[in-house]
Amino acid sequence: MVVCPECTARAKKKILTKYEEEVAEEDRDRQELYKLYDEVDIPMEMDKNTKNFICKKCGLYASREQISDIRYKLNQKERTRDDKSDDYLEWWNKSKKDKNLDS
Ligand SMILES: [Zn+2]
């Protein structure tokens, strides 16, 4: 199944904003956030003639390749944003840092 990258990114952003508002920083749990992300389900419909996909919600019309491309770019953007925030970086990299101490 193909999901709309634009709508999914928007929905996830909304969930993250809400999560940050409602959950104190020390109580935040990545798994919990991912679980909320998993509930986002915005499928696209396939145009049988062109084999392109269309999103009924935002009107995005693209081929499977274009959709992967959009998703990749949106992920990149998201990562850049996170890198700029020290709080986030700290939260995100905690497990990684623990591992680095061993080496
Ligand atoms: Zn959409």
Image: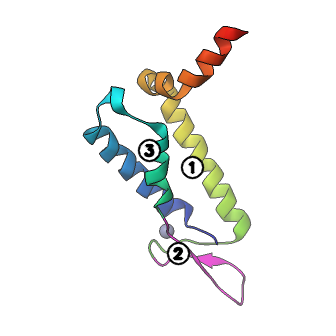
- Mark 1 residue crowding within 10 angstroms, few (<14) / some (14–19) / many (20+): some
Local packing at callout 2 (Cα closer than 10 Å; few below 14, some 14-19, many 20+) is many
43 is within the stretch colored magenta: yes
Residue 89 image label: none
Q: Position of residue 27 (x, y in %)?
A: 34, 31
Residue at mark 1: 74
Q: Give the residue type that dot 1 points to.
A: Leu
CA separation in Å, label 2 and label 3: 27 Å
Q: Amino acid at mark 3?
A: Glu
Q: Position of residue 59 (x, y in %)?
A: 49, 75
Disc nearest the viewer among 1 and 3 = 3
Please, is residue 96 above or below residue 6 in the view?
Answer: above
1 or 3: tag closer to the N-terminus: 3
Q: Is residue 62 left or right of residue 19?
A: right
**Quadrant assignment, res 20:** top left
Looking at the image, which residue sits at the far left? 22
Tell me which numbered mark, 1 or 2, is placed earlier along the sequence. 2
Above or below, 75 relative to 70: above
Q: Nearer the viewer, residue 102 or 46?
A: 102
Q: How is the image coloured?
A: rainbow
Q: Which residue lies at the image location 68% right of the left edge and 56% below the top edge?
A: 69
Marking on residue 55: 2
Residue 74 at x, y = what percent? 57, 49
User: What residue lies at 47% left-to-right and 26% top-to-bottom?
Assistant: 91
Quadrant of the image containing the C terminus: top right
- Classify mark 2 as within 8 Å of ligand 1 or not, answering yes or no: yes
First to last magenta residue range: 41-56
Residue at numbered disc 3? 32
Q: How many numbered callouts?
A: 3
